[in-house]
Amino acid sequence: MEATEPPDAAQRTATLESPERRDDDRLLPSSKVRRLFGIGATTLQEWDAAGILKADQRTAGGHRRWRESKALALLAE
């Protein structure tokens, strides 16, 4: 069985993006948001509960996701 080549970055991006979707509106998992702010998991959960940085979505498994644009806007403040 012959191995297939993985798609290059341009192909992956084209597949994931729709015309109305902006790059900075992608959803980030908590690990990326925590790394962006240099905070721990408990702090991020507290920020969500306090409304400082509310999660935009929860997965079926209950994991929080944040819009990149919202996280970057808070970081710029």
Image (cartoon, helix red, strand yellow):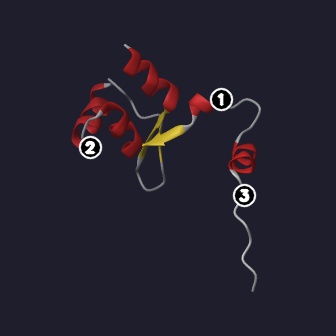
Residue closer to the observer: 56 or 18: 18
Per the image, label 3 sits on a secondary structure element best described as loop
Residue closer to the observer: 34 or 27: 34
Residue at the image point whose x is 34% and y is 39% from the top: 35
Q: Position of residue 53 (x, y in %)?
A: 36, 27
Residue at the image point whose x is 41% and y is 35% from the top: 55
Give the vertical position of 38 relative to 3 (above or below). Answer: above
Residue 22 marker:
1
Q: Quadrant of the N terminus?
A: bottom right
Per the image, label 2 sits on a secondary structure element best described as helix
50 left or right, relative to 67: left
Instruction: Nearest to the eye among marks 3 and 1: give it.
Output: 3
Answer yes or no: do the residues labelled 3 and 1 have beta carbons within 8 Å?
no
Q: Quadrant of the C terminus?
A: top left
Give the vertical position of 58 relative to 61 (above or below). Answer: above
25 left or right, relative to 60: right
Residue located beneath label 3 in the image:
7
Distance CA(mark 2)–CA(mark 3):
33 Å
Q: Residue furthest bottom?
A: 1
Q: Position of residue 71 (x, y in %)?
A: 43, 27
Residue 23, by quadrant, is top right
Distance CA(mark 2)–CA(mark 1):
27 Å
Residue located beneath label 2 in the image:
41
Q: Tell which circle, 2 or 3, labels the residue nearer the N-terminal end.
A: 3
Residue at the image point whose x is 38% and y is 30% from the top: 54
18 left or right, relative to 54: right
Q: Tell which circle, 3 or 1, labels the residue nearer the N-terminal end.
A: 3
Per the image, label 1 sits on a secondary structure element best described as loop
